[in-house]
Amino acid sequence: MTPTQLLRALRARWLTLAATLALCLGLGTALLLVLKPQYTVNATVMLDMKAADPINGAVIPALGISNYLATQADLMRSARVIERALRTLKMDADAQTDADWRADTGGRGDKLAWLGARVLKNLLVTPSRESNMIALAYTGADAQWATDFMKALLDAYIATTIELRAAAAGHNNAFFEEHLSQLRNNLTQAQQKLSALQRDAGVLVNDERLDVENARLTELSNQLLALQIAEADSSSRKQTAKGQIDSTQEALSNPVVGGMTADLARQEARLSELSSRLGERHPDVQQARANIAALKGRLDEELRRLGKSLGINNSVHATRVAQLRQAYEAQREKVARFKALRDQAAVLQRDVENANQAYSDTAARARQTGMESQSALTNAAVVMAPTLPPKPSKPRPLLVMVLASAAGLLLGLAAALLRELTDRRLRSEDDITLLLGQASLGLLPLDALTRPAGGLLARLQPRPALGAR
């Protein structure tokens, strides 16, 4: 069917189109009369992400904001919040609600749960994608009840968030308080062990005391080394003195031995002179020989005494070396013991610090959870409070009539085309060629007596067939 034929068919079937449109408009009007008016109450809640936890100031990470908003929206739709709001409105004691519940369920189940499921169907909670807002909308037949319910729902949501946070904080606080006594005992035991170690050691072992003892050990080591050198030197001189005492440094530097040696040299020189001049038997020569012998005897006695002093000096050095070595070994053991005590004390000190840190952290968390369990703060704020709607939100007369008109036009067009397809007419010369496949022989003009009256009705009436084979 060409567009021209379609327009001619619609002009011919205008009554069908008009009847269908009128029927749809009538149905729309009836629908407006039958439907009860519905009122929508709106509210908006803002969540402060920078103060998700008002006590410790915890901030929700950027990646978790959408999840947090969705969680809060689910909490608003939860049975706990809705039933709490209904309980605030005393809907569980309402006679009409009780009658509806018994009629629907036969008195089985929980009344508030049944009512909450009905209310949830008309509640819309929408978290924003680009902000920290959550939009709420409730639609009901009673504007005042819908407003009261929305207010009760917001109060129930805020009270539930505070209650959930306080309950969780209360459980945490009980846990921390339970472990505080054990941590306190651990700290006391660690301190007692450290004090017992210091008391048993008799000293306060620290790095400064250990440095002093190390300095003493170093000093004793230096003294021992110096005495060992002196002992070795005196021992060497003692061995040398056994064979040639007169050639030792002690003998050469001794003034008595030096004087006797000089006297002996003079006496020997005088004896040699007297012997050559007076002869061996002369009394003066004999006297000189006796003096020399006596002088040698005194010199030998002095050298023996000097050698004995060398031995005594070597013995003194050996004794002092032994004593100093013993003191050095004792000091070294003392330093080693101090190091061991210092290490043990360091371990016990770390145990004390760890126990103290654990106790302090747990005590801080216990104080914090205790504050949270008693806190009535929340990060939710009502930005737009629910107000009584001035007019119904449903149904919308203009929208219903526009939709009815559009549906009437579409259905009217479809009905007119259907009638035209089931009952085809020849409405123009072109229809003869298209529908019958025959050529037109001619056209018969309409008689003036049979022509309809002029005007819009005459123009809309279909024209009779123009010709036939």
Image: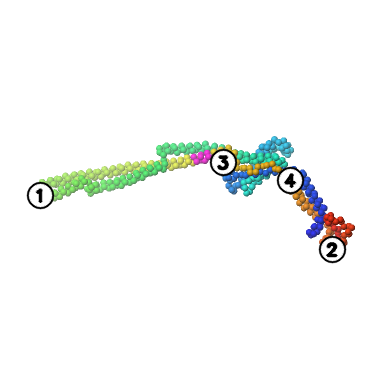
Extreme residue toward the front, this view: 455
Circle 3: element type: loop
Residue shown at 47% from the left, 40% from the top: 352
Give the CA distance from mark 3 to mark 4. 47 Å
Left or right of 304 on screen, residue 101: right
Where on the picture, by quarter, is residue 392? Answer: top right
- Please tell me the numbered disc located at residue 278: 1
Extreme residue toward the right, this view: 449
Stretch of the chain drawn in magenta: 356-366
Q: Is residue 243 magenta?
A: no
Q: How is the image coloured?
A: rainbow
- Please tell me the numbered disc located at residue 395: 4
Give the CA distance from mark 4 to mark 1. 174 Å
Q: Is residue 360 magenta?
A: yes
Which badge, 2 or 3, is on the more N-terminal residue? Answer: 3
Compare residues 350 and 82 and report the one nearer the observer: 82
Please determine whether, in this image, residue 422 is positioned above or below residue 58. below
- Please tell me the numbered disc located at residue 55: 3
Residue shown at 60% from the left, 42% from the top: 379
Mark 2 is surrounded, within 10 Å at the Cα level, by few (under 14), some (14 to 19) or many (20 or more) other residues, namely few
At label 1, the amino acid type is Leu
Which badge, 3 or 4, is on the more N-terminal residue? Answer: 3
Give the CA distance from mark 4 to mark 2. 57 Å
At label 4, the amino acid type is Pro
- Please tell me the numbered disc located at residue 438: 2
Q: Position of residue 45 (x, y in %)?
A: 63, 44
